[in-house]
Amino acid sequence: MQLSSGEVGGTYRVISLRGNPAIKRRLMDMGIIPGTVVKITGRAPLGDPIEISSRGFDLTLRLKEAESIEVEKIE
């Protein structure tokens, strides 16, 4: 599933990054790499952007960026 379709409060493990190479590189520079655990902590009223927490810091991602992150839900 894509991170953009995740629910607020859900915890996910990054499986892969895909899509635009520039977006992939930017996400990797921010520490979003395969194996990283992320939690969706918030979503704007219209759904874009979303806020995630990972590795002790918070990030705000546009939906287009979150769509390029393939994740699996952690129970």
Image: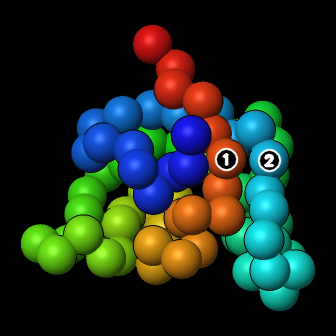
The local secondary structure at tag 2 comes to: strand
Look at label 2 and name its amino acid: Ser
Q: Who's the residue at 54% across and 64% down the image?
A: 66
Is 35 rendered above or below residue 32? above
Q: Position of residue 9 (x, y in %)?
A: 28, 38
The local secondary structure at tag 1 comes to: strand
Indicate which disc residue 56 carries: none
Q: Position of residue 59 (x, y in %)?
A: 48, 68
Q: Who's the residue at 56% across and 40% down the image?
A: 1
- Residue that badge 2 annotates: 16
2 or 1: tag closer to the N-terminus? 2
- Residue that badge 1 annotates: 70
Is 31 rendered above or below residue 29? above
Q: Is residue 4 visible?
A: yes
Q: Quadrant of residue 44?
A: bottom left
Is 58 rendered above or below residue 14? below
Q: CA distance from mark 2 to mark 1?
A: 5 Å
- Image quadrant holding the C terminus, namely top left
Q: Position of residue 35 (x, y in %)?
A: 78, 35
Q: Nearer the viewer, residue 55 or 14?
A: 14
Q: Who's the residue at 66% across and 56% down the image?
A: 69
Residues at badges 2 and 1 in contact (C-beta under 8 Å)?
Answer: yes
Q: Position of residue 18 (x, y in %)?
A: 80, 62
Q: Nearer the viewer, residue 67 or 27?
A: 67
Q: Who's the residue at 12% across and 72% down the image?
A: 45
The single residue placed furthest to the top in the displayed view is 75
